[in-house]
Amino acid sequence: MSGGGVKRLIVGLSGASGAPLAVACLEELRRHPDWEVHLIVSRGAAETIRYETDRTLEEVKALAHVCHDMDAIGAGPASGTFRAQGMLIVPCSMKTVAGIHAGYADNLLLRAADVTIKEGRPLVLCARESPLSPIHLRNLSELSMIPGVTILPPMMTFYNRPVSVEEMTHHMVCKLLGRFGIEPDGFRRWEP
Ligand SMILES: Cc1cc2nc3c(=O)[nH]c(=O)nc-3n(C[C@H](O)[C@H](O)[C@H](O)COP(=O)(O)O)c2cc1C
């Protein structure tokens, strides 16, 4: 359990494309011992981990300090009294976006996001779909107006001249974790 100045981050993985990005975030968080990671993996994410990475679901879960079952709606992150600095959902599917937007908290991932919003804590959504429909855009737009909510899609960046997918992924990891004050090594900021 968290103590001695250790901060907690709730990390949700949902079934949008981008499982390697989620793995890279979890690996980076392991390099920051002042953070304790509470992981929630949706059934959709279990599928994309299988399709998009060489990791087993158990290997991904082992990157977190605590892994909560998606159906465990009585787990810590389901309550506002559970201490946490915020929540990151990476990647965030449009179904999960819709659930958060509607306040339809029928699983632990959605409930934890709902709680994060009601407690006024930072919620970062690495929302991914392409192209985006008017429904997706409406949900994202309305969520973006809630104080503390950041929509940070996994968009490609070229100004840092990436030479590999890994470099592009790392840049995105830096931007996502940066919202929580976590600065990974090797973040290439724009310094003209
Ligand atoms: C390989 C794969 C890639 C997918 N990519 C996306 C995506 O980029 N965005 C999205 O919204 N849904 C995507 N989906 C569909 C979601 O996984 C699906 O809607 C699922 O029900 C989401 O549930 P969850 O949010 O609880 O994980 C993808 C599914 C698969 C199998």
Image (cartoon, helix red, strand yellow):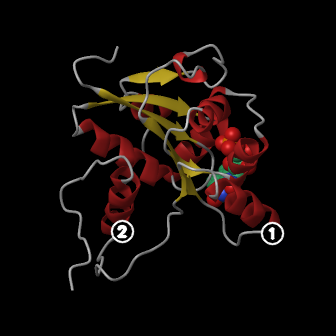
The residue at the point 26 percent across, 77 percent down is 190
The residue at the point 44 percent across, 22 percent down is 83
- Give the SS element for disc 1: helix
Q: Position of residue 160 (x, y in %)?
A: 28, 78
Q: How many marks?
A: 2
Q: Position of residue 34 (x, y in %)?
A: 23, 31
- Give the SS element for disc 2: helix
Label 2 to label 1, Cα distance in Å? 28 Å
The residue at the point 65 percent across, 35 percent down is 114
Q: Amino acid at mark 1?
A: Pro
User: Which of disc 1 and disc 2 is earlier in sequence?
Assistant: 1
- Position of the C terminus, as image quadrant, is bottom left
Q: Position of residue 77 (x, y in %)?
A: 54, 23
Q: Position of residue 75 (x, y in %)?
A: 57, 15
Examine the rendered structure and indicate whether residue 138 appears above or below residue 47: below
Tag in front: 2 or 1: 1
Q: Amino acid at mark 2?
A: Met
User: Any atom of ligand 1 within 8 Å of the CB at mark 2?
Assistant: no
Quadrant of the image occupied by residue 137: bottom right
Quadrant of the image occupied by residue 50: top right
Determine which residue is flagged by label 1. 134
Q: Is residue 91 left or right of residue 188?
A: right
Q: Which mark is residue 168?
A: 2
Residue 117 visible: yes
The residue at the point 30 percent across, 67 percent down is 167
Nearer to us in this view, 120 or 69: 120
Examine the rendered structure and indicate whether residue 147 appears above or below residue 31: below
Q: Is residue 163 left or right of residue 100?
A: left
